[in-house]
Amino acid sequence: MVDENKLKILTEAAKYDVSCSSSGSRRKNEGGLGNAYSGGICHSFTPDGRCISLLKILMSNECLYECEYCPNRRSANTPRAKLTPDEICELTISFYKRNYIEGLFLSSAVCDSPNRTMELLVETVTKLRRDYNFHGYIHLKGIPHADEEIVMKAAKIVDRMSYNIELPSEKSLKLLAPQKTKQSLIEPMKSLKNAIEYERSEKSSRRILPAGQTTQMIIGASPESDGQILKLTQALYRNMNLKRVYYSSYIPVVKSEKLPSVGAGLLREHRLYQADWLIRFYGFDVEEICDESENLSPDYDPKCAWALRNMQLFPVEINKAPLAVLLRVPGIGAKSAYKICEARKYSELSFDDLSRMRVVLKRARHFITCKGKFYGSDNAIQIKRALLLEGINEKAEQLSMFSDRATAISALTGEI
């Protein structure tokens, strides 16, 4: 039986890692407990409002490293705890049988040494699969500086791994996380990416990380601009084939002369997620979204900001514009753009048709025509004012179970 105080310490210590949602795993149950394929992973809200949950815990918060921003750093005056591999396995199975969770997110502070810590994590997930016959979703946090051989053992067992970049530049890493290096984070990502691609090329039954890799960056603890952050994000997607880059707004939970005294705020984090979505699904390059030395606009979402800078490209006719152009219209999400392309094969679309497709017409009307009709403003200042007022009226807030369904779906899918 796991001590309740230990459990509280180690689950609290894990809460700052956000790189663990939406598995996309296809690991199937082969006669044991759990199923990552049908259940997915926690901290992911489905369109109908369900939250899929997992146990998110550290094996230990006794850390050798001295990362300035981390509440578990070596010099921090905080309660310490450590679990054995068997204790974590028993806890996971116990929670699963009670229907509390559908999977596990497992990480650890660097105790003893990077290799020893990684070996204990591998021992834990190996026991879960082999001895406890658990086939549910497992996301494992990689330990910087651990040997590649140990990392690859883990990759063959778990569904997803993440090596968190933490800070957007090597200069900031040296200042705030001196025991970590860019190489200690990037090299494991490269090795895992190459291993995944090799299995694909060999057309073998894929065993290595069926749900891929993710990473996380802390926003606002260091002076990098949004442009620099997004440039790194784009490079990670293109060179490492990451599933997601997560952004964690800096919160001053520890005191340090090297850190800002105030947090970065949720709006900046929100804007970065919107820009990230444009890079992944809307065909934007980071140079179109934001200059390297600049931050994203707090007043307009990144797609609106781009459209306002390129008004010479609008309005576009909804019944003729190619998909790539529709994806750049504010208020038309990726799903809606594909629906438009499919529906107009059979008849010309009207504004009423777009409304039924959940296009945000109060935003899109300034940038489109339907059957030659235009219902927006042709005055750039008025358009800016209308979009600004809309942004004020739709302040970012946590989704409620009773939110308007269209708003909830848009927020969950990232459509803008």
Image (spheres, helix red, strand yellow):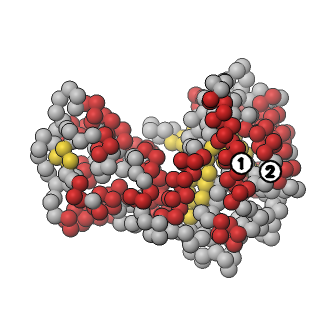
Within-10-Å neighbours for mark 1: few <14, some 14–19, many 20+: many
Image quarter of residue 337: top left
Q: Residue at x 47, y 66 (%)?
A: 292
Residue topped by disc 1: 188
Q: Residue furthest top?
A: 31
Q: Position of residue 129 (x, y in %)?
A: 77, 30
Within-10-Å neighbours for mark 2: few <14, some 14–19, many 20+: some
Q: Does the rendering let one see residue 103?
A: no
> On screen, 164 above or below 38?
below
Q: Position of residue 89 (x, y in %)?
A: 79, 38
Image quarter of residue 172: bottom right
The quadrant of the picture occupied by the N terminus is top right
**Front-lying residue, 222 or 53:** 222
Which numbered tag is attached to residue 146? 2
Q: Residue at x 79, y 37 (%)?
A: 153
Q: Residue at x 70, y 44 (%)?
A: 191
**Front-lying residue, 407 or 413:** 413
Q: Residue at x 16, y 59 (%)?
A: 377
Distance CA(mark 2)–CA(mark 1): 9 Å
Q: Position of residue 133 (x, y in %)?
A: 77, 27
Image quarter of residue 274: bottom left
Do residues under tags 2 and 1 come within 8 Å of each other at their CB atoms?
Answer: yes
Looking at the image, residue 189 sits to the left or right of residue 152; the answer is: left
Looking at the image, residue 245 sits to the left or right of residue 295; the answer is: right
| Amino acid type of the residue tagged 2 in the rendering | Ala
Q: Position of residue 378 (x, y in %)?
A: 15, 60
| Amino acid type of the residue tagged 1 in the rendering | Pro
Secondary element at image label 2:
loop
